[in-house]
Image (cartoon, grey):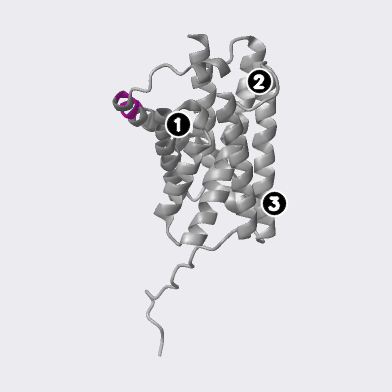
Amino acid sequence: MNAPAAAQQAPSSPKLIAPFWHTALFLLALGVIAAWGAHRQGLPTFGSSRAVSYLFTMAWEWLLFALAAWGIRLGGGSIESVIGERWSTAKQFGRDVGIGVLFLVGSNILLAGLQALLRPGPNANIGRLLPRSATEITLWIFLSLSAGICEEFTFRGYLQQQLNGWLKNATAAVMIQGVIFGAAHAYQGLKLVLTIVVLGSLIGWLAQWRKSTRPGMISHFLQDAIGGIVLGRH
């Protein structure tokens, strides 16, 4: 007897992408750098130079990227499997750029409404780290690019997928990584941290929907680069 044509295999259950101990190590490293930033009330660094702070933060971003990539390798996976579909055509690239830009506009409208309710007010910690000179603006762009790539890979890629594999619940994974993402920006104050939690969760849903961190990387980069330069100028 032939099987029904409509019969399909049940979708596979999400799995861990790294060992438990590795995720504990990753969260410990993240907690140390977040606590350091909160203690300094800004980006963690040595000295008071913004340029040095940018360079130091970029190094930390890529070290966390490397730590997450190591865990994925230990779990038998690949960086590409976590990042998502590779661009093989200009159309695919343009599609993700378009999604990233639309998400940037939509999320900023939503977050502007949230901030109107929370009324966080001027934040001296953020003001101190914004770029002013041409050299600082150049470094800020590279810092924004590093943040866009590394933070999306580590939070919406590694951490979100690992939590989903552990909890078997995509919603919980998205929300928990959003909370951790917000806590990592504790130096910005409680009200802005709440905004960042919402933003991190929204980008998490974007990654879950697209099965890719690439649109989020684009949006994150543009958000940091444009926002930082504009605020630094004014």
Q: CA distance from mark 3 to mark 2?
A: 27 Å
Residue extent of the magenta highlight? 112-116
Q: Which residue is mark 1?
A: 101
N-terminal label among 3 and 1:
3
Residue sitting at 44 percent across and 44 percent down?
A: 206
- Above or below residue 110? Residue 122 is above
Q: Position of residue 166 (x, y in %)?
A: 51, 61
Q: Which residue is mark 3?
A: 70
Q: Circle 2 sits on which residue? A: 139
Element carrying mark 1? helix
For this view, does 105 lie left or right of residue 159? left
The residue at the point 54 percent across, 63 percent down is 15
Where residue 21 sits: x, y (%)? 64, 57
**Which image quarter holds the N terminus?**
bottom left
Of the pair 229 and 83, the residue shown nearer to us = 229
Residue 42 in view, yes or no:
no
Marks 1 and 2, the one that precedes in the sequence? 1
Q: Residue furthest bottom?
A: 1
